[in-house]
Image (spheres, helix red, strand yellow):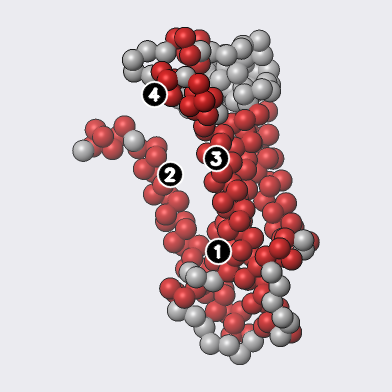
Amino acid sequence: MWRELRKHGLTVTMLGAFLIFLALQSVFGWHVHNEELSQYGREGLSYLAYLRTGHFAEATFENWESEFLQMGGYVLLTAYLVQQGSSESKPVHQGDREKDRAENATTDSPWPVRVGGLPLVIYRNSLSIALLMIFAGSFVGHLLGGTADYNEQQMLESGASPISAWQFLSTSDFWFQSMQNWQSEFLAVGALIVLSIFLRQHASPESKPVTSPHTATEAG
C-alpha cells in the first residue's frame, strides 16, 4: 500500500490539500454569510443550507474558473510559443517530439494513437480541451452562483427584484470578479516562466538542473 501511495503521492497530497482548504473555505464562508444576514436582522443558515447558496457557489467557481483558464491557456500556448532559457518552455528550435508522431506508435500506445483519424486529432489536443471545458463549466457555475448571491444582496439591501443570469453577465460586478482572478493567474504563470530562467529548485521537474546555464531552454 505504501509503495502505491508513494507512486501517487503528488496527486494524493494535492487533492488532499484541496479538500481540506475547500472545507475550511466553506466553514469560514458560512460564518461570514451568517454575519451578513444578522446585520440585516435575518436568521442565520445551517451549514448544509449554506452549501446551497450563491455565496458559496460564487466564491468556489469564481476561483476554479480562473485556475482552469490559466492552466488550459498555458498548456495550449506552450505548444506554439517559446521562451528561451525557461524550464517551462520547449527548446526554441524544437518541433514535434518523436513520440508525438503517429507512425511511431507502439502496442502500448493509447488506443486513439493506434486507431488514427478523428480520435487521434481529438486525443492530440485532449489535455487543453479538458482543461478549457472545466473552465467553461466553472464559468457557468460562477455566473449562476454570482447571480443568486447578487439577487440575495439586492433583496437584503433594497428589496429590489431579482435579475436573470443573462442580466448579471452584463454587469461590471461579474466581470470585476473574473478579471481580478484572471490577471493574477497569468501574472503567476508569467513569473514562473521568467524566474525559471535564472533560478533553480533542486530535484523539481519545474526547474532546470542546477548546473544548466541560464540560456539553456529545457522543458521540465
Instruction: Identify the residue at horizontal 26%, vertical 34% (top origin).
Output: 4
> How far apart in space, not on screen, are marks 2 and 3 (Cα)?
17 Å
Q: Residue furthest left?
A: 1
Mark 2: amino acid: Met
User: In the image, is 137 to the left or to the right of 105?
Assistant: right
Instruction: Find disc 3 in the rendering and name its residue.
Output: 131
User: In the image, is 101 to the left or to the right of 110?
Assistant: right
Q: Are marks 1 and 3 in contact (CB under 8 Å)?
A: no
Dot placed on the residue nearer the N-terminal end, 4 or 2: 2
Instruction: Identify the residue at horizontal 71%, vertical 85% (top origin).
Output: 159
Q: Residue furthest bottom?
A: 41
Q: Is residue 128 above or below residue 182?
A: above
Instruction: Find disc 4 in the rendering and name its residue.
Output: 111
Instruction: Find disc 1 in the rendering and name its residue.
Output: 57
Dot placed on the residue nearer the N-terminal end, 1 or 3: 1
Dot placed on the residue nearer the N-terminal end, 4 or 1: 1
Mark 1: amino acid: Ala
Residue 68 position, x and y percent, is 58, 44
Dot 4 falls on a residue whose secondary structure is helix
Q: Are marks 4 and 1 in contact (CB under 8 Å)?
A: no
Mark 4: amino acid: Trp
Q: Which of these two is toward me, 113 or 188?
A: 113
Residue 10 position, x and y percent, is 39, 37
Instruction: Find disc 2 in the rendering and name its residue.
Output: 14
> How far apart in space, not on screen, are marks 4 and 1 (Cα)?
38 Å
